[in-house]
Image (cartoon, rainbow, N blue to C red):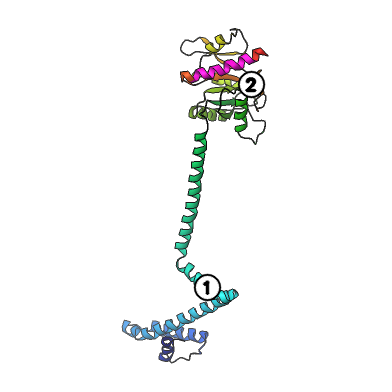
Amino acid sequence: MNEQLKQTYERLNLSENITREELDKRFDLLLKRMRSVSTERDKQSYEEEFQAYKFILASLDQQEIQAAENLRLKKWGRFTGIARKGEHFFRLYKMHTILAFIVVIVLIVAGRGIYSHVQEQKYLASLPPIDAKIMFMGNYMLHDSEAENTALEEAFIALYPKWKRVETQIVYLPVTENGSLDMNYQQKAIVQLAADPPDILIMDEAAFQWIGQQAGLRNLDVVVAAGGISSEDVRLKKANNLESNLQEVVGLDITDTKFASGLPLNPSTMIASVLTLDEQKAKSMMEFIEQVIQEADAR
């Protein structure tokens, strides 16, 4: 027992062995006496005794806490002191420790993200430029539903090796039971088409009938002429030109071609159209369609 606590017991004329129960009773009695007096001056006369009891009770509380802590840390044996200091440190700097831990995690995650981004940029920089962006719109699905578009892109390049790198995306556009296109999927298709317009758009019959009504598909008369295709060829897909109000070829059915059958997609009609406005690139896209059609004729 420290000297200050010992003197406090003596000032209150209390035994150092007094029980906590008896001490609480005496403190409650003091509080009743303080409440019974009416003037502030009389209350002040009890203040020193009141503070002395509070000091003793606080000391007893601290002793009980210390005893409980000693019992809890007993399992650490000779490392009890180290464990106690660790707990005290964490108790004092709990919020600082948690914040520091969070900051470290954020820095690690951010660092990994930056590293991954840099590595991805290096990888993309090492690739050849994209020769064509191709969008498949309609009731198309990969043979392997778990696979990514990488398999489709690799098959595309294998069938048309003139291009070294293509980027593909599949916009699912199913037909409902009543034979019309699903409106929700139509809205999504419009958004994707506007957000990332492809160079070549390959559609099934239902998608072509819908898209063909819109302006934007390029006239493929050049491809038809270069391929020596008859104007009556059933593979030609036509739509009205909104300016001239005349029918013009805007799509070619490549369904029965070696190219179409070599793609890892479920069997479906494939109508190829060109969207790009870049003349040089459009020429390249038309050359692709022309070659696919000519291979079909050669068979």
Taking the spot 65% from the left edge, 12% from the top edge, the residue there is 297
- What mark, if any, has residue 198 been given in the picture? none
Residue ID at (35%, 83%) = 43
- For image coordinates 42% across by 88% down, the residue present is 3
Neighbour tally class for label 2: few under 14, some 14-19, many 20 plus, Cα within 10 Å: some
Q: What amino acid type should be assigned to the residue bearing mark 1?
A: Ile
In this orientation, which residue lies closer to the viewer: 224 or 186? 224
Please provide percent x and percent y for residue 112: 51, 48
| On screen, residue 158 above or below 234 | below
Looking at the picture, how far across and down is residue 274, in whole percent? Answer: 53, 19
User: Residue beneath label 2, please?
Assistant: 259
The stretch in magenta equals: 281-295
Q: Secondary structure at mark 2?
A: helix
Residue 217 can be seen in this image: no
The answer to whether 44 appears left or right of 6 in the picture is left
**Front-lying residue, 213 or 4:** 4
Residue beneath label 1, please?
82
Q: Quadrant of the C terminus?
A: top right
* First-in-chain label (1 vs 2): 1
Q: What separation in Å lies between label 1 and label 2 (alpha carbons)?
A: 73 Å
Against 84, residue 210 (above or below) is above
